[in-house]
Image (tube, rainbow, N blue to C red):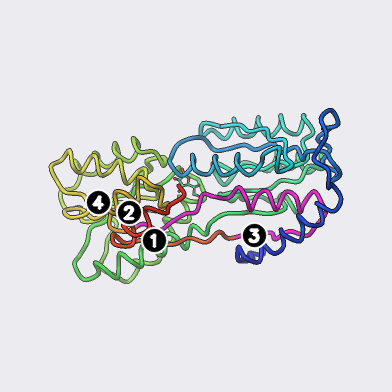
């Protein structure tokens, strides 16, 4: 799959042109009663079926808010939204319902990478374009989706590991890893990126286990790590929520998170940034959840028959403790 890194400014220019083109053919707001959801341009709303992973983390809540705020009626959409509670079978049945409804576009964030070919084939056979947000899929189906909007998780893992090496190489650090949902693109890719970055340093991963991206999961797994190991120097958590769970476990064990045991996480949600500013985390690589505006633009371009980028990589920042204190007042999520 060709991966085009598509700067947000270029996308904004494309979408401005696209929205102008759309505006030229539907200057009147959609009148009531003729909302067939056919999405063929004109005054109808574009009907979108969105299957969300769940509500497992602060990141997910911010992502859901961004999508719902962007796909509103006043923006020209009729949104059907479903929460899969982190179960692939729930996402597959939601997508089948959207196909049966005959929506104009289906979008979803796949909870895991594999197992999607049958339902993607059904959407393709029904002539319904699919947009991936947030996470990728492995598929053998040609043109299974029109675009994938989301961060580069390998890069996020690599940046986390690079910072750890810069700060701690040469001290024989023992690292434990709180992995995201087993089989999910962010868990697979962040683990890979981090491992690649620390290769050749003296940092050693002594244990690694999934906390399923939840705070409770991170706390329980960290409690287990603290029982099994008395030499942990650093936690690499695949998201803030599991890192915050680790903070609770470390404090309950009478130690100081951020000092006795360092913590590096990924996401950059408000609770995580606050922990970083308070010195309980040491570094966060952001994973921008605000994908709604880009999704809206891609859907409108798709329905208008405009070419769209196959891969849109969202921009992520990174923060140490000082940078978190400065950034916190202006954070949107
Ligand atoms: C990343 C997203 C991950 C977040 C977690 O794009 O899929 O899932 O890092 C969330 O917080 O649960």
Secondary element type, mark 2: strand
Distance, label 4 to label 2, CA atoms, is 18 Å
Residue in the image at 84% along x and 37% along y:
38
Q: Which residues are magenta?
A: 284-312
Observer-nearest of 75 and 231: 75
* First-in-chain label (1 vs 2): 1
Magenta segment: does it hold 181? no
Q: Secondary structure at mark 4?
A: loop
Marks 4,1: beta carbons within 8 A:
no
Give the image location of residue 220, x and y in percent.
29, 36
**Residue at which label 3 appears:** 311
Q: Residues within 10 Å of mark 3 (few under 14, many from 20)?
A: some
Question: Which residue does the numbered mark 4 point to in the structure image?
Answer: 278
Q: Position of residue 88 (x, y in %)?
A: 57, 35
Question: Residue 210's x, y, as percent?
Answer: 38, 43
**Magenta includes 290?**
yes
- For the point 47% across and 52% down, the residue is 188
Quadrant, the N terminus: bottom right
Kindly indicate whether the residue at mark 3 contacts the one at mark 4 (C-beta within 8 angstroms).
Answer: no
Graded by Cα atoms within 10 Å as few (under 14), some (14 to 19) or many (20 or more), the crowding at tag 4 reads some
Is 63 on the left-hand or right-hand side of 27? left
- Which residue, given by chain and number where applicable, does mark 2 sit on? 236
Q: Which is more foreground, mark 4 or mark 3? A: 4
Q: Are marks 1 and 2 in contact (CB under 8 Å)?
A: yes
């Amino acid at each position: 799959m060709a991966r085009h890194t598509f700067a947000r400014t270029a996308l904004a220019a494309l979408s401005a042109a696209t929205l102008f083109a759309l505006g030229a053919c539907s200057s009147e707001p959609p009148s009531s009663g003729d909302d067939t959801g056919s999405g063929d341009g004109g005054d109808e709303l574009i009907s979108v079926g969105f299957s969300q992973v769940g509500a497992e983390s602060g990141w997910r809540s911010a992502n859901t808010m961004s999508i719902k705020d962007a796909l509103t009626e006043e923006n020209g959409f009729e949104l059907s939204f479903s929460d899969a509670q982190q179960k692939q079978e729930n996402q597959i049945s939601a997508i089948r319902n959207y196909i049966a409804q005959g929506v104009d576009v289906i979008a979803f964030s796949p909870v895991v990478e594999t197992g999607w070919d049958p339902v993607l084939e059904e959407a393709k056979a029904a002539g319904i374009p699919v947009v991936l947000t947030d996470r990728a899929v492995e598929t053998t189906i040609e043109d299974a989706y029109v675009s994938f909007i989301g961060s580069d998780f390998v890069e996020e893992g690599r940046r986390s590991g690079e910072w750890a090496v810069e700060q701690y190489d040469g001290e024989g650090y023992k690292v434990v890893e709180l992995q995201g949902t087993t089989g999910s693109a962010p868990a697979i890719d962040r683990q890979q990126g981090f491992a690649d970055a620390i290769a050749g340093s003296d940092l050693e991963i002594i244990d690694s286990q999934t906390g399923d991206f939840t705070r409770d999961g991170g706390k329980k797994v960290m409690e287990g790590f603290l029982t099994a190991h008395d030499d942990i120097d650093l936690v690499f958590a695949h998201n803030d929520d599991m890192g915050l769970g680790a903070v609770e476990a470390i404090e309950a064990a009478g130690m100081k998170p951020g000092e006795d045991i360092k913590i590096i996480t990924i996401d950059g949600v408000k609770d995580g940034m606050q922990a970083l500013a308070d010195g309980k985390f040491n570094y966060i690589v952001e994973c921008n959840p605000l994908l709604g505006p880009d999704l809206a633009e891609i859907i409108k371009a798709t329905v208008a028959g405009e070419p769209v980028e196959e891969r849109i990589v969202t921009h992520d920042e990174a923060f140490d403790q000082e940078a978190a204190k400065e950034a916190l007042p202006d954070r949107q999520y």
